[in-house]
Amino acid sequence: MDASLWSSTLLSAFQSVWDPIARFIPAFLAALVILIIGLIVAAALRALLERVISALRIDSALRKMGAEAFMERAGMRLNSGKFIGGLVYWFFIVIIALAASDILGLWGLSTFLNEVLLYFPSVIAAVLIMLAALIIANFLRQLVKGSVMSARLHAPKFLGTLTYWSIVIFGFLAALLQLGVATQLINTIVTGFIAMLALAGGIAFGLGGKDYAAHIVERFRQHTEDH
């Protein structure tokens, strides 16, 4: 009787330990297969995208926009194919990891990976903002430089470069806002900068254009009184 009781107790304990393991092993194997296949597919997609973007010569177009100089100042090398390929690669990896964590029932990890997945659109939007800023900055730099030279004014190159970097910096700050990085600090900086420009413009007009402003007011007064 005692032996039967002991054997029954041991069997019950063994089953209580083995049942979760027996349920976990198929889920683990399924998650492992999904991860392996996902890694292969993600690597293939990255290689394909790098070749396609290299064939489209996007880097050459970005160099003409001045993107390479901006990247070099940031200590990075211009390689749009590698960047986009890497972005797609990690996006796909996060999706595969999310699927695997759901299969294994790791709900805390699934929640974290889902938040990471939702962050990717912000990264893409930030990249597009910076690209648009570089295009507009390069166009306005040439426009300002050409306009200043046509008007035979001084420092056309300096004014063009100032215009370029002003737009690039604003684009960079907008990209950081899109990413949610130091939002309050950036809003304060942008507000302060705009206030500084408005104050500087008001002081400049007040000191340098007061005579012309008085002339305009006088002509308006005369026109009003005559009619």
Image: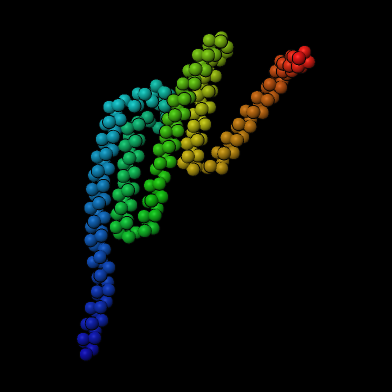
Q: Nearer the viewer, residue 75 or 171?
A: 171
Location of residue 148 (image quadrant): top right
- Residue 71, position in %: x, y? 42, 30
> What residue appears at the point 26 percent right and 36 percent down from the top-left corner?
47
Residue at 52 percent of width and 31 percent of height = 170
Q: Position of residue 82 (x, y in %)?
A: 32, 34
Instruction: Specify the quadrant of the image occupied by residue 78.
Output: top left
The image's colour scheme reads rainbow
Mark count: 0
In the displayed structure, does residue 191 sit left or right of residue 140?
A: right
Q: Is residue 197 left or right of residue 106?
A: right
> Please, is residue 15 above or below residue 169 in the view?
below
The residue nearer to you, when weighing 74 against 52, is 52
Measuring 56% from the left and 41% from the top, which residue is drawn there?
Answer: 185
Q: Residue at x 21, y 87 (%)?
A: 3
Whole-percent x, y for residue 212 in the image: 71, 15
Q: From the viewer's perspective, tell me whether residue 214 is left or right of residue 11.
A: right
Q: Is residue 175 above or below residue 65?
A: below
- Quadrant of the image containing the N terminus: bottom left
From this viewpoint, which residue is outermost toward the right?
225
**Could one spot residue 165 in this view of the protein?**
yes
